[in-house]
Amino acid sequence: MSIIILILGNILVIGLEGFVAVIQAIRLNLYELGGKFCECEGRPFENVKEYAIIKNKC
């Protein structure tokens, strides 16, 4: 019985490792290729602290 659990556990681990590798490869491809074809329009980031009023609770 323990050999069956060992084999099934190894198959599960191999499958999950393959799944993670595929996800990382897709993410890397989209990040590398997406930056080349993306025309980013919008406003630049501005820090919020300049606009926020921070009050002390003392």
Image: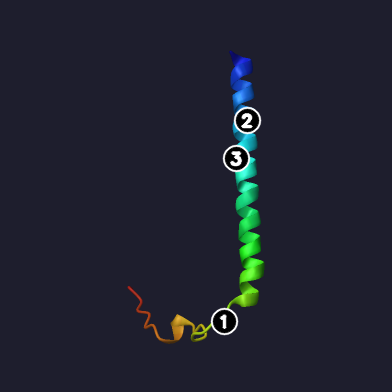
Image coords of residue 35 (percent x, y): 63, 74
Give the SS element for disc 1.
loop
Residue at which label 1 appears: 39
Which sits earlier in the primary sequence, circle 1 or circle 2? 2
Picture quarter with the N terminus? top right
Q: Name the residue under label 2.
A: 11
The amino acid on which the numbered mark 2 sits, given as a three-letter code, is: Ile
User: Which badge, 3 or 1, comes first in the chain's sequence?
Assistant: 3
Q: Quadrant location of the C terminus?
A: bottom left
Report the Cα–Cα distance between label 1 and label 2: 43 Å
Q: What type is the residue that disc 3 sits on?
A: Leu
Residue 16 in percent (x, y) is at 60, 40
Distance between the alpha carbons at the discs numbered 2 and 3: 9 Å
Q: Do the residues labelled 3 and 1 touch (CB within 8 Å)?
A: no
Which numbered circle lies on residue 16? Answer: 3
- In the image, what residue type sits under mark 1? Glu
| Residue 16 falls left or right of residue 48 | right
Taking the image as shown, residue 51 lies to the left or right of residue 40, namely left
**Farthest-out residue, left:** 57
Q: Which of marks 2 and 3 is nearer the N terminus?
A: 2
